[in-house]
Image (cartoon, helix red, strand yellow):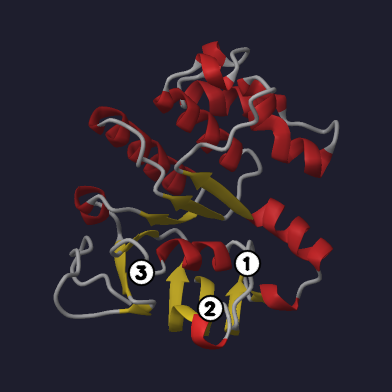
Amino acid sequence: MCILKLQHVEKIYGEKENQVKALRDISLQVEEGEFTAIVGTSGSGKSTLLNLIGGLDNPTKGKIFIKNREIGALSRKELTIFRRRNIGFVFQNYSLMPVLNVYDNVALPATFDRGKHLNRRYMEELLRELGIWEKRKKYPHELSGGQQQRAAIARALVNKPQILLCDEPTGNLDSATTVDVVGLLKTSCRRYKQTILMVTHNEAIAQTCDRVIHIEDGRIVTGKGRFPGKGGDGVC
């Protein structure tokens, strides 16, 4: 089942002679449960694409559908609620709240959405599975980079989103921790039937994904320079 569809999406920043076309005529479909890598050189439009899909920015042209809903047609309030319930984000810099401990950082999205109705059993299960239950009372500055990223992943998963958007989630991690984090994402993808889109510069990681989308100069490209997706040509 198609969970994400982009139709002729463009993103332009600036005006007139200062105009920059970050994305050009992007059309693609992503199936439910796919683990997709988005690759390309720096400045090619990868993070811009992720931000548009996540509703953090608006396309200049085109339409984006998630679960058959055009997110551009939602009001700001509707989009906030839809995003919180359906989309999780994992960033390279973790983006944890420094004044909150691990448990409260992870609980934050659920608290916004459900108030006092936090599923504490699921919270514990999630933190144990990610190997940070014993660190739940620690603050971000007391954790290693890998532990901070695990906390960020737990926070992204706490509302059981159907789509998880990861922007260079292993960019600040060593190779061993990178393998662990990608493994955790894959486990989550299978267990909760999630769809994951992950921007990465790491070719080895890209090759382990179900599919690879290669972007250059704001366009999805085919031909040379692609990373092979598992099971053959993964470029849309």
Q: Amino acid at mark 3?
A: Ser
- Residue 194 visible to an observer of this rendering: no
Q: Which label's residue is closer to the chain start, 2 or 1?
A: 2
| Residue pointed to by mark 1 | 57
Specify the quadrant of the image occupied by residue 187. top left
Query: Left or right of 84: which side holds 125?
Result: left
Residue 190 as seen in the image, left or right of residue 117: left
3 or 2: tag closer to the N-terminus: 2
Dot 3: within a 10 Å radius of its alpha carbon, few (fewer than 14), some, or many (20 or more) residues?
Answer: some
Identify the residue under disc 2: 11
Q: Which mark is residue 44?
A: 3
Q: Are marks 2 and 1 in contact (CB under 8 Å)?
A: yes
- Above or below: residue 103 compared with residue 194: above
Element on which disc 3 rests: loop
Density class for disc 2 (Cα within 10 Å; few <14, some 14-19, many ≥20) is many
User: Badge 1: how crowded within 10 Å, few (<14), some, or many (20+)?
Assistant: some
Question: What is the number of the mark on residue 214?
Answer: none
Disc 1 residue type? Answer: Asp
**Do tag 1 and tag 3 residues touch (Cβ < 8 Å)?**
no
Residue 178: x percent and y percent? 30, 35
> Which circle's residue, 1 or 3, is located before the other in the chain?
3
Q: CA distance from mark 2 to mark 1?
A: 9 Å
Q: Residue furthest front?
A: 17
Disc 3 to disc 2: CB gap under 8 Å: no
Q: Position of residue 52 (x, y in %)?
A: 57, 68
Location of residue 5 in the rendering, given as x and y in whole percent from the top left corner: 52, 77
Q: Where the C terminus falls, by quadrant?
A: bottom left
Q: In the picture provided, is 19 more to the left or to the right than 76?
A: left
